[in-house]
């Protein structure tokens, strides 16, 4: 019954996201046409621009909500996580602040993981996005470090002698200790951005857990580290 209910919820979210994106496509199209009208006054153009920003934020929210549910088809395969993250570098650059630099460090002999590429891509992207957003305004360095580690103490979900660690380190303002227990809750965000969804870390934590892994963090002012651990 639990499995059937979960599948129903997944189908419901995917269906709603698809319908909402169809509606938002109309917003984008007609607002774009109106913004091309040179006869409109400045106040009207500014108002339309804000509506357009809101429609873009709503589209992003639908995409992020859709990513919470399980992909309709799951393909498990061997993934070399170092090469995989390097391949995502151009995507990171598109959301990187003008003053922020991304550095990737991954040894060539890193063991492979057995995982679904779509879920791993989403989890990694959301963790890195979180770091990039923390440094967007002030700039700085976001480091992505990969390494092999022994099985975490007390974790017996997977009897793997080696685990793969992906650490994302940023020098942003950090996460206040009082908010630490809430950062993985849906729709909670420490960002001051108007359209912050508060879903990124929720998505990442869910996907890591589905792979039998761990997602943890430590934070002080000017240094925040999120570590994703997956069995090799």
Image (cartoon, rainbow, N blue to C red):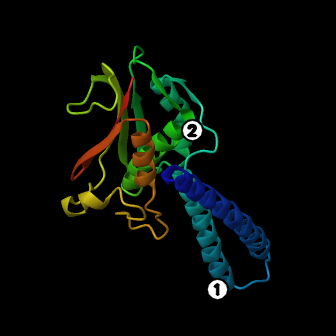
Q: Residue furthest front?
A: 1
The quarter of the picture where the C terminus appears is top left
Look at mark 1 in the image and give the residue it sits on: 43
Q: Nearer the viewer, mark 1 or mark 2?
A: 2
Image position of 74 (left or right of 161): right
Residue 225 image point, x, y percent: 28, 43
Q: Position of residue 103 (x, y in %)?
A: 40, 34
Please tell me which of labels 1 and 2 falls first in the chain.
1
Q: Secondary structure at mark 1?
A: helix
In this image, 141 relative to 41: left or right?
Answer: left
Residue 55's label in the rendered image is none
Residue 178: image location, x then y, percent? 20, 63
Q: Is residue 35 left or right of residue 191?
A: right
As helix, strand or loop, the secondary structure at mark 2 comes to helix
Q: Is residue 100 visible?
A: yes
Q: Is residue 17 left or right of residue 129?
A: right
Q: Is residue 227 above or below residue 196?
A: above
Q: Residue at x 62, y 63 (%)?
A: 59
Q: Nearer the viewer, residue 107 or 148?
A: 148
Q: Is the residue 222 above or below the residue 177 in the image?
A: above
| Residue plotted at (45% across, 58% down) | 199
Residue 186, picture quadrant: bottom left
The answer to whether residue 87 is above or below residue 93 is: above
Label 2, on which residue?
118
């Amino acid at each position: 019954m639990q499995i059937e209910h979960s599948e129903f919820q997944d189908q419901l979210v995917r269906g709603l996201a698809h319908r909402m994106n169809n509606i938002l496509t109309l917003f984008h199209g007609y607002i774009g046409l109106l913004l091309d009208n040179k006869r409109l006054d400045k106040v009207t153009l500014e108002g339309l621009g804000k509506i357009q920003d809101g429609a873009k934020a709503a589209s992003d929210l639908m995409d992020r909500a859709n990513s919470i549910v399980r992909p309709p088809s799951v393909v498990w395969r061997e993934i070399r996580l170092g090469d995989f993250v390097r391949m995502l570098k151009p995507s990171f650059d598109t959301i990187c602040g003008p003053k922020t630099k991304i550095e990737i460090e991954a040894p060539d002999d890193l063991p492979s993981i057995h995982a679904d590429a779509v879920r791993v891509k989403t989890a990694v992207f959301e963790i890195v996005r979180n770091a990039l957003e923390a440094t967007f305004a002030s700039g700085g360095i976001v480091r992505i470090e990969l390494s092999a580690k022994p099985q975490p103490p007390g974790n017996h979900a997977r009897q793997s002698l080696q685990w793969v660690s992906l650490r994302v380190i940023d020098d942003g303002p950090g996460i206040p200790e009082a908010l630490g227990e809430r950062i993985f809750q849906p729709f909670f965000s420490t960002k001051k951005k108007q359209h912050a969804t508060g879903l990124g870390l929720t998505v990442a934590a869910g996907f890591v857990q589905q792979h039998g892994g761990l997602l943890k963090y430590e934070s002080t002012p000017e240094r925040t580290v999120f570590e994703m651990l997956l069995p090799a």
